[in-house]
Image (cartoon, helix red, strand yellow):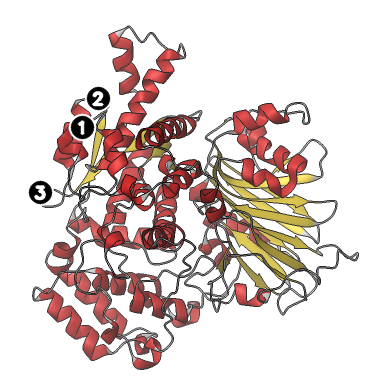
Amino acid sequence: MCGIAGIIGDYNEGQLDAMLASQHHRGPDATGKYLDSKYAALGHNRLAIIDLSVQSNQPFVDNSGRYLIVFNGEIYNYIELKADLQSQYDFKTESDTEVLLAAFIIYGASCLGKCNGMFAFTIWDNQEKKLFAARDRFGVKPFYYAFKNQTLYFSSEIKALHAAGIPKIPNEQVWASYFAYGSYGMPDETFWSGIAQLPGGHFMEVEGCQSEPVEDLSAKKTLRPLDKLATGSSQYDKLQTYCQSEPVEGFPSKRIIIKKWYCFEDEVAKQPQNLTFEQAKEKYVALLKDSVNLRFRADVAVGFNVSGGLDSSVLLALVNLQVLRQAQNGNFNPDCQSELVEGLQSINAYTFYTNNSDYDELPWVEKMIAKTGNPLTKVLLQADAVPDFTQKITWQQDEPFGGIPTLAYAKIFEQARKDKVLVLLDGQGMDEQWAGYDYYTQNNEATIQGVQDSPYKIKMLSDSFLAKALKPVYPKPFEDEVLNKQYRDLFYTKIPRALRFNDRISMAFSTELREPFLDYRLVEFAFSLPLDFKIRKGQTKWMLREIASGYLADDLVFAPKRALQTPQREWLARDLAVWVSQSFQGITNSSFADWFNKELFHKELQLYLAGNKQSSFHIWQLINWYEILGKEPENQL
């Protein structure tokens, strides 16, 4: 994993340097840049994971010198792809970067469908003066962009665009929708006006970067103008091809195409039908094992994150099956107990805790780990560390994030870096593919498990600010309502926000996070299965529990889902009450105070401190807002 940055058009090299400096934490091992005078400047911060040699540093140029790539992520099946390409391309490194570039040169945009991985990359054609950029299916890796003075800027993090001179102007519509509906924006939106993101499963082509005439794009379908993509005024109701065929303000002499390359619904429809439960289970287990196996490909130490839940339990079991697989491949003697133990002890497990028995999953984790022998590192987050750590993680995130659980999770990556474990696996994605949340079978629009009252307190907002909010409307491509809720969570709500939170906290400490359960093959196959395979006898994730029962004790397999992992509600109301009150007072004194009804939002705080704390989301929203916007002098926004 790394950081990418670039400027297409009239650039200043100092701007690129500032962008790379702001993203140094994403890749401390090497920083490189490529300048195509008057046309493009591309930069890269490298975190070396596969092929650690300097020959694999980026920007990386192909053998002909025509194509250049900057790439953030991993192509897990690069070994298989390389074997297919070997007769058509002369490889000079062992990196997945070169494989991805070769695949693009040979296959064009269709190379994306051949890649199993997480990625955001750009390829510059210095002959045709064209840019190609793409993002993985689910948007695991970020790609932000903006336009200014006839120039395109792109980066892995929003702060890099600000470092290049893109103004820090809050997108009031997205902020209002966040407070009113809990929305973090549509897949192409951000909380900053003038800054957009390339949605997952899409690619971008920029043409007309040279002075000569380019292909006429006027015949291509245009759904909305380019400037709308970067101003935060989009209504992302249709995930389909759109392109700009006319020059627009801010980018007048060039053409841009943004196209959806991954159609999830179509891929789900291609899955095998009418499988029995046992046939489906067998196929899914095979995919699970292969997914974990692929994500162990690294030239650095690999560990994993574990909680006390079902998903982590399955991950733990599969990680240790990987050790046995290595034994069978001859890495060590599977009949030698000491070598097996040594193999298990080479894979570190990490978990966090808060010293609060009402929330900590540590007893469950220790019980699981006791059976496998993996070394377990327990990382403590205490209340008094929250204010300063919130400030650090807020800077890393650039946008609102999920609260104290995100802070606790971040501490794991901080420790892993100290331990020189640079790759961690986690269990994200199982609830969305196996209908694991209680609201999937409820007749409501909830997106938060276990909450009865609305966590959104719109009375805190001023009338003028609330009027800017747009209630998000999500597509429903499936006939089944449960599938549509799963689809919403996968592409619009839970997974996009979790991936963004987790990308920033892992990269904050120069570590790589891999999500084996978000392998597209697993998600597509699970979505295609009957609801009865997912929910049975009142139990969610039924097939997954059946799979887990082959490796784990029943008290782990059938443990109820625990919605909360930290004492955020209690800490904000008690241990951190002074900090919370100071944040609320800071909002009152900020240059954006007119977003709020001061009397009512102070009343909400008093009610919360007095004991009405069924949900702390609105309290965290305001703290997070203050850390992002309230502390900034108006002339710096």
The residue that mark 2 highlights is: 372
Per the model, the C-alpha gap separating discs 1 and 3 is 17 Å
Pick whichever, 637 or 336, lies toward us. 336
Q: Determine whether label 1 and label 3 are within 8 Å by CB.
A: no
Q: Residue at x 45, y 46 (%)?
A: 523
* Mark nearer the N terminus (1 vs 3): 3
Of helix, strand and loop, which one carries label 1? Answer: helix
Q: Residues within 10 Å of mark 3 (few under 14, many from 20)?
A: few
Q: Nearer the viewer, mark 1 or mark 3?
A: 1
Q: Determine whether label 1 and label 2 are within 8 Å by CB.
A: yes
The residue that mark 3 highlights is: 357
Q: Amino acid at mark 3?
A: Ser
Of helix, strand and loop, which one carries label 2? Answer: loop
Question: Is residue 394 in view from this perspective?
Answer: yes
Q: Is 262 rendered above or below residue 624?
A: above
Q: Measured from the top left, where is residue 412 in percent x and y?
A: 31, 44
The residue that mark 1 highlights is: 368
Q: Residue at x 26, y 86 (%)?
A: 459
The image quarter containing residue 350 is: top left
Q: Measured from the top left, where is residue 222 in percent x and y?
A: 71, 73
